[in-house]
Amino acid sequence: MSDIENNWFREVQNDLWPGQSFSLKIKKKLHEENSKYQNIKIFETETYGTCLALDNIIQCTSRDEFSYQEMISFLPLCIHQKPQKVLIVGGGDGGVAREVAKHPLVEEIHQVEIDDRVVELSKQYLPNMACGFKSPKLKLTIGDGFEYMKAHENTFDVIITDSSDPIGPAISLFQENYYKLMKTALRPNGIVCAQGGSFWLDSENIKNTMKNSSKYFKTVKYAVTSVPSYPCGHIGFVIASDEDNVNFISPVQKYNSSELDLMGLKYYTSNVHSSAFALPRWIEKYLYE
Ligand code: SPM
């Protein structure tokens, strides 16, 4: 485990966050391998539970993963009038499938993940996320998201892209062609939501992704959530609709506290939904003006 020294994992990434790194103290190394696509590490930490890192970038820890997985799922699902058929691209740990399956209007979940080893290892070491794969609503395909969408035109109400960062193979998931393809795979009035990076680190990338998205979608917004184990402690999502002036801020479906409890949601509420779109002044001006 090269990024591990004296039992500390250091998340060094010189292209995306030069000169800084978040570290986690390791309690126990659980697994490491190089799959066909990437280096996969799983370790138990002293304070963040179990951590999954791909190519030395933290994807999730069992302590704070619910923030990301609930928000990337419930923001688009609660904006859509009737989110019956959902596609998840990526999401190999199963956490997004777990959340999407909770939404009462969702009938079918299709997921396409390229790396079967991430899925298998998550089943073994991250059962609280990989339980998403057990949902009777889910059909999991191991393969390429681009090819899957090409074969499924006019099919989905919501497409969620739970990708790694825009470096290496995942870079194509932030580009114009990907948004073009998502548009063709969506039914009318569909919504897309994708991992969008942190405004402290990736403002230029976010602006580019939003520009790429706006070539095919009429309403495009950026929303944030707090995830302490990601660099700068937060991450955002690019959310888009092919309808004009959709009010993303006020969810169509609102759930009260006991309904949220029944679904097992710990982070998402209608108020959190609305506040996710409130951005500090400088980044709002940069992204929207
Ligand atoms: N299902 C959880 C997978 C998480 N996918 C996103 C991981 C992003 C990690 N890096 C964040 C850096 C933000 N600039």
Image (cartoon, rainbow, N blue to C red):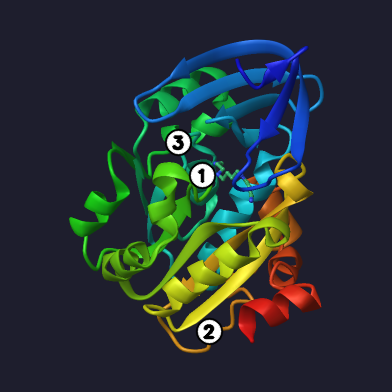
Placement of 272 over or under 14, stated as above or below: below
The residue at 59%/28% (across/down) is: 52
Q: What is the crowding at mark 1: few (fewer than 14 residues within 10 Å), some, or many (at least 20)?
A: many
**First along the sequence among labels 2 and 1:** 1
Mark 1 CB in 8 Å range of ligand 1?
A: yes
User: Do the numbered discs 2 and 3 sit on residues whose CB atoms are within 8 Å?
Assistant: no
What label sits on residue 92 in the rendered view?
Answer: 3
x%, y% of residue 198? 67, 57
**First along the sequence among labels 3 and 1:** 3
The residue at 63%/82% (across/down) is: 288
Q: Nearer the viewer, residue 229 or 243?
A: 229
Q: Amino acid at mark 2?
A: Val
Mark 3 CB in 8 Å range of ligand 1?
A: yes
x%, y% of residue 95? 54, 39
x%, y% of residue 171? 43, 52
Q: Nearer the viewer, mark 3 or mark 1?
A: 1
Secondary-structure class at tag 1: loop
Task: Indicate the quadrant of ligand 1 in the picture.
Answer: top right
What label sits on residue 164 in the rendered view?
Answer: 1
Q: Amino acid at mark 1?
A: Ser
Placement of 62 over or under 70, stated as above or below: above
Q: What is the crowding at mark 2: few (fewer than 14 residues within 10 Å), some, or many (at least 20)?
A: some
Placement of 266 over or under 133, stated as above or below: below
Instruction: List the residue tagged with mark 2.
Output: 246
**Quadrant holding the N terminus:** top right
The residue at 67%/47% (across/down) is: 17
Q: Quadrant of residue 84?
A: bottom left
Q: Quadrant of residue 236?
A: bottom right
Q: Nearer the viewer, residue 21 or 189?
A: 21
Placement of 113 over or under 77, stated as above or below: above
Q: Amino acid at mark 3?
A: Gly
Q: Is residue 80 something one can see in this rendering?
A: no
